Image (spheres, rainbow, N blue to C red):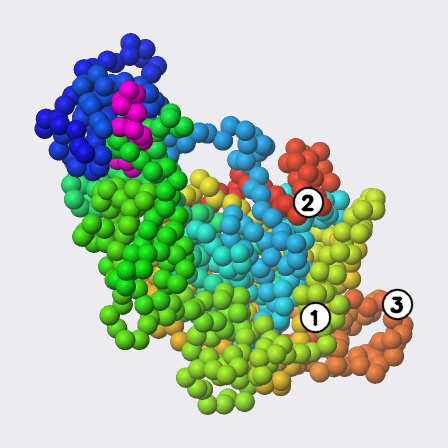
Amino acid sequence: MQPQLGPSTTAADTPTDDPAVRCVDLNVSIGGPNKDGQIVLKGVPAPLDYYDICERLRGVGLTMPLKDPGAQRPDALLVLPEEHQLAVREFPSEFTPCAGGFLNLDEPLIHFYNKVFLVAVKPSDSGASDAGDRGEISETTIEPDGCSVNVGGVGISFRRTVRVPDNAKTHALPPDMGAFTIYNSADYLSRLPLQIVEKGGAFIAMYQREAMWISFTRSPPLTNDYAVKISVGGVNALTGKPQGERAQTQDYLAVKTAGSQQWLDGVSTAPGVVKQFVAMPLGQGYTVEGQVTGQEAVGGLQIDVFPAFPRAVEFRNGAVSLNLFKTPRELGMKEGDVVKMFDKRDENLEWRILGPNQPAGSVSAQVISMIAYPNYQFGGAIHLRLETGEVRMGPFPVKNDVAALRAHLPSVIPGCLFGRQWDKLSFSGQTLEDGKRLSDFNIVPGSILELPLQTSERPRFAPQAGPFFGRGRGGLFGSAPQGGGRGGGRAFGAASQPATGMAFGAAAPQTRFGASASGAPAVLFAAPTGFAEAGHVAQRQQMQQMQAQPQMQAQPQMLMEAAQAVSGLAAGGTIAQKVVRDTLPPAAYDLASGIRLHVAIVNAPQFPLITGLPAPASPVSAQTYLAMNLPWFKLWEEHVPVARNVLPGSGNVLGEVKSVAEMDRERKAKGEETVQRECTYCTYEMATVVLSPCTHAFCDGCLAGVGARVCPACSGAVVGRVQVAAAMPVAGNEEWAGVQVSSGDPRIVHLRRFASTGRVGSFRRAGDRVSVLFA
């Protein structure tokens, strides 16, 4: 029963004289959401106190039929989700809990919510460790398998693949050949060249001209959207501009929960086209960095990950919902206008009950709406009555939100998943509408909701996400292709078989990670130790055993040779691959929370010098893969929007970057010596071994069956062999067609703390500034 009240009753003002105490106004409805007879209590101290509010209600003469008439207190006071009124002005934004706030005309709404409002209402993380280092060092984590790294919430792995032919053709996506092992630079500080140590981070070992692709994994699943900038030697891989210079086109990859980039195979040189990442030594001008900047001082990869701001908020101007990523000025507003902000965080949508067992509660809005329940069934359940009359029961929802209830019921009330029209859920004759609160319909614990039967004859079954097998890489991602998913359409094998409408055959999907035609794992070749995933783990265990022993002091000669071990990324053959256009604007991302990872590239022949471990095995050639009739991958991705990062007039210089083969041909025409030597005998295979002391170079094939102690070219005595590259043809001469379409520096002291922990520290040096995002 509702109390007998007039249209509105206002309590006598009893404000406190203490200016440090913040006060709010309460709008109290009795028994339900009905606004008639609402009581207004002004100047109520915050945090709210149940007994104080009850005393104020009695002060206005409120009487209710209560369980304990002598107490004259309601069973429960429900604090409704808070809304905030913000005045628009020219001055900087500000917000004071319980006092209100101001919104700057030129600040995006999403920035106000995260940078002003949440900072004001959430306690600061004053207990964080290493607070003084956070601006200088960025921390990431190598996963236990040693083959992937978590950068700010994004799982990233670096994968081997065969080189596509470095010719004038555009090729389909090449197959996956296993992951590179990722090594923490902090574990090898006394052995690494200063060029790597001064940046920290991690490193991988690649042979010259070995190809790599970067995978953004979905395990564990992403919990947020991210903007990921990839730079090669300090040059943005999408725009060709220095990493600290702002571009005028999209200069990042959108790695998101849906509709995102899932991998990158090279530098973006034209719309829908990339030139493959291949490794080349620094100092010879082959790398993208060398061609774009004229110097090769950085090398390796730089990865910057920026999380999207939380978007659990709604801004309204009257009844119109406003675009979170625009400023009031862009929305046509002027100084003096008022904007309402509805905070949709879980803590604001939860049932916040004040009562004898929960007497106090914090609030932050100037005006608080509240419902006083004379009788409240604490611990009560929610009931669901079907059209048949059957009643099911489940726990009462945590959130005071219709949409949350609708999503909550199918899982908590067994047997009601199929054949039910959840959009027809109703209470007391009113259909529940998303966007409203349960309290708007006076739903409380013990309420009985109505759910009609599905009218169709055949029940609706919940759709199940089928496996997505893309490029063989697609098996990583486990859901329908989103924005550039590989293998979503057809796969083309070496035999050029007619393509079907299914991805690698519906009966036995083929994944790039080596599924056979029968669905069982295919044995591509006898993988040497350290190449397959199991080999990576074994190699990492060996490394950890070595770390338990005292590390030898590096000799000057060792350091000199190690300094020559650093490589960079050059451009290889051309691959058809889209850079997905982001559906979010740059304003959606939190640049202040960016995480940096440096990934140095060590020349594989020098890898044993640095780590004491065997050099990684060379990948098989593309001919090996084609000969086994395993697929390369072409995508049907017409629906995927392409980023405008390489359009004519965009200023992107990567279209002018030359591949390794192009540079070799130019240098040979000018009579210049190339870095990668051809075999002394056959001239169409790359030299993989250099004999000493004569320095004659040969490919593996030509050395086969030749005595190990005499050079076949000069008949001189051989005292040593050095492997310099992977077994592969000279770039541009491929015969197959491929498939088209130690230091006292405080930073180093800090970095040592990461050794043997799996934590990777990357330094943010003065020259490593990253530009703001642009789309």
Count residues near mark 2 (Cα–Cα under 10 Å), then give few for <14, some for 14-19, many for 20+.
Answer: few
**Mark-to-mark CA distance, 1 and 2:** 29 Å
Instruction: Give the extent of the magenta segment.
Output: 66-84
Which SS class for mark 3?
loop
Across and down, in percent, residue 234 comes to 52, 51
Spatial CA span between label 3 and label 1: 23 Å
**In this view of the protein, which residue sits in the foreground, 654 or 322?**
322
Task: Determine which residue is flagged by label 1.
Answer: 618
* Image depth: mark 3 or mark 2 in front: 2
- Amino acid tagged 2: Thr
Whether residue 663 is visible: no
Q: Is residue 222 above or below residue 519?
A: above
Residue nearest the viewer, comparing 695 with 98:
98
Secondary structure beneath label 1:
loop
Q: Which residue is mark 3?
A: 719
Q: Earlier in the sequence, mark 3 or mark 1?
A: 1
> The N terminus appears in which quarter of the rendering?
top left
Identify the residue shown where x is 42% and y is 52%: 225
161 lies left or right of 526 = left
Q: Amino acid at mark 3?
A: Val
Identify the residue position indicated by label 2 in the image. Answer: 757
Q: Residue at x 34, y 14 (%)?
A: 20
Q: Are marks 3 and 1 in contact (CB under 8 Å)?
A: no
* Residue 338 location, quadrant: top left
Earlier in the chain: of badge 3 and badge 2, it is 3
Q: Residue furthest top?
A: 17
Camera-side residue: 733 or 530?
A: 530
Any magenta on residue 69? Answer: yes
Report x, y in % for residue 157: 58, 59
